[in-house]
Amino acid sequence: MFRLLQVFRKRPASTILPEVPTRQDKVNEFWSVSPEEKFSAQGWYWMAHPMVRERVNIRISGNQWLDAYGRLGVWLAERGEAVPLGPSISLGCGFGGLERDLARRGMIREMDAYDLADGAIVEARRLAEEDGHGWIRYHVADLEAKDFAQSHYAAVFAHSSVHHVERLEELFTTVRRALRPGGIFHLNEYVGPTRFQWTDAQLQLINGFLDSLPDHLRQTPNGRKPPVVRPTIEQMVAMDPTEAVRSAEIRGLLSQYFSIAEERSCGGALLHMGLAEIAQNFDTADAEAVAHLQRFFDLEDTMMANGTIGSDFTVITAVRE
Protein backbone atom coordinates (compact mmCIF):
# COMPACT_ATOMS: atom_id res chain seq x y z
CA MET A 1 0.00 0.00 0.00
CA PHE A 2 1.54 3.28 -1.10
CA ARG A 3 2.09 6.00 1.46
CA LEU A 4 0.20 9.21 0.78
CA LEU A 5 2.54 12.16 0.63
CA GLN A 6 1.77 15.23 2.67
CA VAL A 7 1.40 18.41 0.64
CA PHE A 8 2.91 21.71 1.77
CA ARG A 9 2.13 25.26 0.71
CA LYS A 10 5.02 27.71 0.49
CA ARG A 11 5.05 30.11 3.44
CA PRO A 12 7.71 32.07 5.29
CA ALA A 13 10.13 29.58 6.86
CA SER A 14 8.93 30.27 10.38
CA THR A 15 5.27 29.59 9.54
CA ILE A 16 5.34 26.53 7.25
CA LEU A 17 2.31 24.45 8.11
CA PRO A 18 1.13 21.16 6.62
CA GLU A 19 -1.77 21.44 4.21
CA VAL A 20 -4.41 18.72 4.42
CA PRO A 21 -4.42 16.80 1.12
CA THR A 22 -7.61 17.20 -0.88
CA ARG A 23 -9.60 14.28 -2.27
CA GLN A 24 -8.05 14.88 -5.70
CA ASP A 25 -4.54 15.06 -4.18
CA LYS A 26 -5.03 11.64 -2.61
CA VAL A 27 -6.57 10.10 -5.71
CA ASN A 28 -3.86 11.49 -7.97
CA GLU A 29 -1.09 10.35 -5.62
CA PHE A 30 -2.43 6.81 -5.35
CA TRP A 31 -3.73 6.19 -8.87
CA SER A 32 -0.99 7.88 -10.90
CA VAL A 33 1.41 5.08 -9.91
CA SER A 34 1.66 2.61 -12.79
CA PRO A 35 0.54 -1.01 -12.33
CA GLU A 36 4.11 -2.15 -13.01
CA GLU A 37 5.47 0.02 -10.18
CA LYS A 38 2.78 -1.27 -7.83
CA PHE A 39 3.52 -4.89 -8.71
CA SER A 40 7.22 -4.33 -8.13
CA ALA A 41 6.68 -2.71 -4.74
CA GLN A 42 3.71 -4.71 -3.48
CA GLY A 43 3.59 -7.98 -5.36
CA TRP A 44 0.89 -9.15 -7.75
CA TYR A 45 -2.75 -8.22 -7.69
CA TRP A 46 -4.77 -11.43 -7.29
CA MET A 47 -6.10 -11.39 -10.88
CA ALA A 48 -2.58 -11.06 -12.28
CA HIS A 49 -1.98 -14.79 -11.75
CA PRO A 50 -2.67 -16.80 -14.95
CA MET A 51 -4.54 -19.57 -13.11
CA VAL A 52 -6.77 -16.99 -11.43
CA ARG A 53 -7.47 -15.32 -14.78
CA GLU A 54 -8.40 -18.67 -16.31
CA ARG A 55 -10.67 -19.41 -13.36
CA VAL A 56 -12.40 -16.02 -13.64
CA ASN A 57 -12.78 -16.44 -17.40
CA ILE A 58 -14.51 -19.79 -16.91
CA ARG A 59 -16.95 -18.20 -14.48
CA ILE A 60 -17.63 -15.36 -16.94
CA SER A 61 -17.79 -17.24 -20.24
CA GLY A 62 -17.36 -20.97 -19.66
CA ASN A 63 -14.05 -20.76 -21.56
CA GLN A 64 -10.68 -20.26 -19.88
CA TRP A 65 -9.47 -18.17 -22.83
CA LEU A 66 -12.56 -15.95 -23.18
CA ASP A 67 -12.53 -12.98 -20.80
CA ALA A 68 -15.21 -10.41 -19.93
CA TYR A 69 -14.78 -8.50 -23.19
CA GLY A 70 -14.58 -11.64 -25.29
CA ARG A 71 -17.87 -12.69 -23.65
CA LEU A 72 -19.31 -9.26 -24.46
CA GLY A 73 -18.37 -9.79 -28.11
CA VAL A 74 -20.26 -13.10 -28.10
CA TRP A 75 -23.25 -11.46 -26.40
CA LEU A 76 -23.32 -8.68 -29.01
CA ALA A 77 -23.14 -11.24 -31.84
CA GLU A 78 -26.01 -13.22 -30.30
CA ARG A 79 -28.10 -10.05 -30.39
CA GLY A 80 -27.10 -9.25 -33.95
CA GLU A 81 -25.21 -6.13 -32.86
CA ALA A 82 -22.47 -4.95 -35.20
CA VAL A 83 -18.96 -4.09 -34.06
CA PRO A 84 -17.16 -1.81 -33.82
CA LEU A 85 -19.67 -0.12 -31.56
CA GLY A 86 -20.64 3.49 -32.06
CA PRO A 87 -19.43 6.37 -29.86
CA SER A 88 -18.43 5.02 -26.44
CA ILE A 89 -17.25 6.18 -23.02
CA SER A 90 -14.79 4.65 -20.56
CA LEU A 91 -15.28 5.65 -16.94
CA GLY A 92 -12.22 5.66 -14.67
CA CYS A 93 -9.81 4.70 -17.45
CA GLY A 94 -6.58 4.94 -15.43
CA PHE A 95 -3.58 4.23 -17.70
CA GLY A 96 -5.82 3.30 -20.63
CA GLY A 97 -5.33 -0.45 -20.80
CA LEU A 98 -9.01 -1.21 -21.39
CA GLU A 99 -9.44 1.28 -24.23
CA ARG A 100 -6.36 0.06 -26.07
CA ASP A 101 -7.49 -3.53 -25.64
CA LEU A 102 -11.00 -2.80 -26.98
CA ALA A 103 -9.44 -0.97 -29.94
CA ARG A 104 -7.14 -3.92 -30.74
CA ARG A 105 -10.15 -6.26 -30.65
CA GLY A 106 -12.00 -4.02 -33.11
CA MET A 107 -14.83 -3.41 -30.64
CA ILE A 108 -14.63 0.40 -30.60
CA ARG A 109 -13.90 3.12 -33.14
CA GLU A 110 -14.68 6.31 -31.22
CA MET A 111 -14.14 6.70 -27.48
CA ASP A 112 -13.85 9.33 -24.78
CA ALA A 113 -12.15 8.13 -21.61
CA TYR A 114 -12.14 9.87 -18.23
CA ASP A 115 -10.16 9.65 -14.99
CA LEU A 116 -9.46 11.94 -12.04
CA ALA A 117 -5.76 11.01 -11.82
CA ASP A 118 -4.02 13.41 -14.21
CA GLY A 119 -0.73 11.51 -14.08
CA ALA A 120 -2.49 8.39 -15.38
CA ILE A 121 -4.20 10.38 -18.15
CA VAL A 122 -0.88 11.77 -19.40
CA GLU A 123 0.54 8.26 -19.70
CA ALA A 124 -2.69 6.88 -21.23
CA ARG A 125 -2.47 9.46 -24.02
CA ARG A 126 1.16 8.57 -24.69
CA LEU A 127 0.50 4.84 -24.79
CA ALA A 128 -2.52 5.25 -27.08
CA GLU A 129 -0.44 7.29 -29.53
CA GLU A 130 2.33 4.72 -29.36
CA ASP A 131 -0.18 1.95 -30.05
CA GLY A 132 -1.64 3.75 -33.06
CA HIS A 133 -4.89 4.65 -31.30
CA GLY A 134 -4.48 8.38 -30.97
CA TRP A 135 -8.18 8.75 -31.77
CA ILE A 136 -9.01 7.66 -28.20
CA ARG A 137 -9.66 10.95 -26.39
CA TYR A 138 -8.48 11.04 -22.77
CA HIS A 139 -9.78 13.61 -20.28
CA VAL A 140 -9.15 14.48 -16.63
CA ALA A 141 -12.60 14.54 -15.01
CA ASP A 142 -14.37 13.74 -11.75
CA LEU A 143 -17.03 11.07 -12.28
CA GLU A 144 -18.87 12.46 -9.27
CA ALA A 145 -19.76 15.56 -11.30
CA LYS A 146 -19.24 14.76 -15.00
CA ASP A 147 -22.08 15.04 -17.54
CA PHE A 148 -22.22 13.82 -21.15
CA ALA A 149 -24.12 14.50 -24.36
CA GLN A 150 -27.62 13.06 -24.16
CA SER A 151 -28.71 9.95 -26.11
CA HIS A 152 -25.42 9.98 -28.00
CA TYR A 153 -23.45 6.91 -26.93
CA ALA A 154 -23.73 3.27 -27.95
CA ALA A 155 -21.83 1.95 -24.93
CA VAL A 156 -20.37 2.98 -21.60
CA PHE A 157 -17.61 0.87 -20.05
CA ALA A 158 -16.57 0.82 -16.40
CA HIS A 159 -13.69 -1.42 -15.35
CA SER A 160 -13.12 -1.32 -11.58
CA SER A 161 -14.20 2.32 -11.41
CA VAL A 162 -17.83 2.53 -10.26
CA HIS A 163 -16.91 1.30 -6.78
CA HIS A 164 -14.93 4.56 -6.44
CA VAL A 165 -18.06 6.69 -6.95
CA GLU A 166 -20.07 7.95 -3.97
CA ARG A 167 -22.90 9.61 -5.89
CA LEU A 168 -24.06 6.40 -7.56
CA GLU A 169 -27.59 7.62 -8.20
CA GLU A 170 -26.30 10.67 -10.06
CA LEU A 171 -23.79 8.63 -12.04
CA PHE A 172 -26.36 6.04 -13.12
CA THR A 173 -28.77 8.81 -14.11
CA THR A 174 -26.03 10.49 -16.14
CA VAL A 175 -25.02 7.25 -17.88
CA ARG A 176 -28.62 6.35 -18.67
CA ARG A 177 -29.20 9.80 -20.14
CA ALA A 178 -26.00 9.59 -22.20
CA LEU A 179 -26.83 6.23 -23.79
CA ARG A 180 -28.97 5.78 -26.85
CA PRO A 181 -32.07 3.59 -26.36
CA GLY A 182 -30.75 0.04 -26.43
CA GLY A 183 -27.25 1.22 -25.51
CA ILE A 184 -25.20 -0.89 -23.10
CA PHE A 185 -23.55 -0.13 -19.79
CA HIS A 186 -20.85 -2.74 -19.21
CA LEU A 187 -19.40 -3.05 -15.71
CA ASN A 188 -16.48 -5.22 -14.63
CA GLU A 189 -16.59 -4.37 -10.95
CA TYR A 190 -15.82 -4.93 -7.32
CA VAL A 191 -19.17 -5.14 -5.52
CA GLY A 192 -17.98 -6.55 -2.18
CA PRO A 193 -18.15 -5.03 1.29
CA THR A 194 -18.18 -1.24 1.37
CA ARG A 195 -14.89 0.27 2.59
CA PHE A 196 -13.47 -3.28 2.71
CA GLN A 197 -15.38 -4.14 5.86
CA TRP A 198 -14.72 -7.84 5.45
CA THR A 199 -17.09 -10.27 7.13
CA ASP A 200 -15.94 -12.44 10.02
CA ALA A 201 -16.35 -15.49 7.76
CA GLN A 202 -14.08 -14.00 5.10
CA LEU A 203 -11.36 -13.16 7.60
CA GLN A 204 -11.49 -16.55 9.27
CA LEU A 205 -11.30 -18.46 5.98
CA ILE A 206 -8.58 -16.28 4.44
CA ASN A 207 -6.36 -16.37 7.49
CA GLY A 208 -6.88 -20.09 7.93
CA PHE A 209 -5.58 -20.61 4.40
CA LEU A 210 -2.61 -18.29 4.96
CA ASP A 211 -1.69 -20.12 8.16
CA SER A 212 -1.63 -23.40 6.24
CA LEU A 213 0.92 -22.18 3.70
CA PRO A 214 4.64 -22.94 3.87
CA ASP A 215 6.66 -19.81 4.63
CA HIS A 216 8.08 -19.41 1.11
CA LEU A 217 4.57 -19.04 -0.34
CA ARG A 218 3.67 -16.39 2.20
CA GLN A 219 6.55 -14.04 1.41
CA THR A 220 5.82 -10.58 0.01
CA PRO A 221 8.30 -8.15 -1.56
CA ASN A 222 8.52 -6.54 1.87
CA GLY A 223 8.58 -9.52 4.23
CA ARG A 224 5.96 -12.01 5.41
CA LYS A 225 2.30 -11.47 4.59
CA PRO A 226 0.52 -10.64 7.86
CA PRO A 227 -2.98 -11.81 8.74
CA VAL A 228 -5.72 -10.01 6.83
CA VAL A 229 -7.65 -7.65 9.11
CA ARG A 230 -10.69 -5.44 8.72
CA PRO A 231 -9.44 -1.87 8.19
CA THR A 232 -11.03 1.04 9.98
CA ILE A 233 -13.03 3.53 7.95
CA GLU A 234 -10.47 6.18 8.90
CA GLN A 235 -7.66 4.06 7.47
CA MET A 236 -9.55 3.56 4.23
CA VAL A 237 -10.27 7.26 3.81
CA ALA A 238 -6.66 8.18 4.57
CA MET A 239 -5.39 5.77 1.91
CA ASP A 240 -7.94 6.64 -0.78
CA PRO A 241 -11.22 8.44 0.05
CA THR A 242 -12.87 6.90 -3.00
CA GLU A 243 -12.01 3.24 -2.35
CA ALA A 244 -15.12 1.01 -2.18
CA VAL A 245 -17.10 4.00 -0.97
CA ARG A 246 -20.51 2.40 -1.69
CA SER A 247 -19.49 -0.82 -3.40
CA ALA A 248 -22.04 -3.08 -1.73
CA GLU A 249 -24.90 -0.95 -3.13
CA ILE A 250 -23.90 -1.06 -6.80
CA ARG A 251 -25.88 -4.15 -7.82
CA GLY A 252 -29.14 -3.09 -6.19
CA LEU A 253 -29.04 0.48 -7.45
CA LEU A 254 -28.00 -0.42 -11.00
CA SER A 255 -31.17 -2.47 -11.54
CA GLN A 256 -33.27 0.60 -10.73
CA TYR A 257 -31.85 2.46 -13.74
CA PHE A 258 -31.15 -0.27 -16.31
CA SER A 259 -32.35 -3.65 -17.44
CA ILE A 260 -29.78 -6.25 -16.41
CA ALA A 261 -29.25 -8.36 -19.51
CA GLU A 262 -26.51 -10.56 -18.08
CA GLU A 263 -24.52 -10.92 -14.87
CA ARG A 264 -21.60 -13.29 -14.37
CA SER A 265 -20.15 -13.54 -10.86
CA CYS A 266 -16.36 -13.79 -10.65
CA GLY A 267 -15.88 -14.79 -6.99
CA GLY A 268 -12.95 -13.22 -5.19
CA ALA A 269 -14.39 -12.96 -1.68
CA LEU A 270 -11.42 -15.02 -0.46
CA LEU A 271 -8.91 -14.89 -3.31
CA HIS A 272 -8.83 -11.09 -3.57
CA MET A 273 -7.23 -10.41 -0.20
CA GLY A 274 -5.83 -13.87 0.39
CA LEU A 275 -3.57 -13.69 -2.68
CA ALA A 276 -2.80 -9.96 -2.51
CA GLU A 277 1.00 -9.41 -2.46
CA ILE A 278 1.78 -13.15 -2.69
CA ALA A 279 0.09 -14.29 -5.93
CA GLN A 280 3.48 -14.23 -7.72
CA ASN A 281 4.74 -16.99 -5.41
CA PHE A 282 2.44 -19.63 -6.91
CA ASP A 283 4.62 -20.67 -9.82
CA THR A 284 2.63 -22.72 -12.33
CA ALA A 285 5.71 -24.94 -12.83
CA ASP A 286 5.75 -25.80 -9.10
CA ALA A 287 3.36 -28.69 -8.39
CA GLU A 288 3.26 -27.95 -4.66
CA ALA A 289 2.40 -24.27 -5.22
CA VAL A 290 -0.28 -25.16 -7.76
CA ALA A 291 -1.83 -27.65 -5.34
CA HIS A 292 -2.06 -24.99 -2.62
CA LEU A 293 -3.61 -22.52 -5.05
CA GLN A 294 -6.14 -25.09 -6.27
CA ARG A 295 -7.02 -25.82 -2.65
CA PHE A 296 -7.81 -22.13 -2.18
CA PHE A 297 -9.97 -22.16 -5.34
CA ASP A 298 -11.87 -25.18 -4.02
CA LEU A 299 -12.39 -23.50 -0.65
CA GLU A 300 -13.86 -20.39 -2.23
CA ASP A 301 -16.12 -22.48 -4.48
CA THR A 302 -17.41 -24.53 -1.56
CA MET A 303 -18.06 -21.51 0.63
CA MET A 304 -19.87 -19.71 -2.21
CA ALA A 305 -21.98 -22.77 -2.94
CA ASN A 306 -23.14 -23.14 0.68
CA GLY A 307 -23.82 -19.41 1.09
CA THR A 308 -21.08 -18.68 3.62
CA ILE A 309 -19.65 -16.02 1.29
CA GLY A 310 -20.86 -14.27 -1.83
CA SER A 311 -19.08 -13.01 -4.93
CA ASP A 312 -17.17 -9.77 -4.43
CA PHE A 313 -16.55 -9.26 -8.16
CA THR A 314 -18.97 -9.35 -11.04
CA VAL A 315 -19.38 -8.58 -14.74
CA ILE A 316 -22.71 -6.98 -15.67
CA THR A 317 -24.12 -6.07 -19.05
CA ALA A 318 -26.96 -3.59 -18.51
CA VAL A 319 -29.18 -2.07 -21.20
CA ARG A 320 -30.94 1.26 -21.42
CA GLU A 321 -34.55 0.53 -22.35
Image (spheres, grey):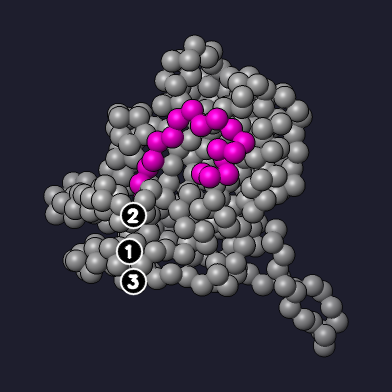
Is 190 situated above or below 82? below
Q: Which residue is drawn at 24% across and 63% down?
A: 209
Q: How crowded is mark 1: few (under 14 residues within 10 Å), some or many (20 or more)?
A: few
Residue at the extreme front? 256
Is 112 situated above or below 279? above
Q: Earlier in the sequence, mark 1 or mark 2?
A: 1
Q: Which residue is drawn at 57% across and 72% down?
A: 234
Q: Which residue is drawn at 69% across and 61% down?
A: 23
Report whether 296 appears left or right of 237.
left
Q: Kindly identify which numbered label has been placed on residue 201.
A: 1
Alpha carbons under labels 3 and 2: distance apart: 19 Å
Confirm whether residue 62 shows in the render: yes
Alpha carbons under labels 1 and 2: distance apart: 7 Å
Q: What residue type is labelled 3?
A: Pro
Q: Which of 172 and 33 is in front in this view?
A: 172
Stretch of the chain drawn in magenta: 251-268
Q: What residue type is labelled 1?
A: Ala
Q: Kindly identify which numbered label has been placed on residue 227.
A: 3
Residue 99: x and y in percent read 56, 33
**Does the CB distance between marks 1 and 2 fall below 8 Å?**
yes
Residue at the extreme bottom? 14
Q: Which amino acid does label 2 sit on?
A: Ile
Secondary structure under badge 1?
helix
Residue 254: x and y in percent read 57, 40
Secondary structure under badge 2?
loop
Alpha carbons under labels 1 and 3: distance apart: 14 Å
Report whether 81 appears left or right of 311.
right
Q: How crowded is mark 2: few (under 14 residues within 10 Å), some or many (20 or more)?
A: many
Residue at the extreme right? 12
Q: Does the magenta stretch include residue 269?
A: no
Q: Kindly identify which numbered label has been placed on residue 309.
A: 2
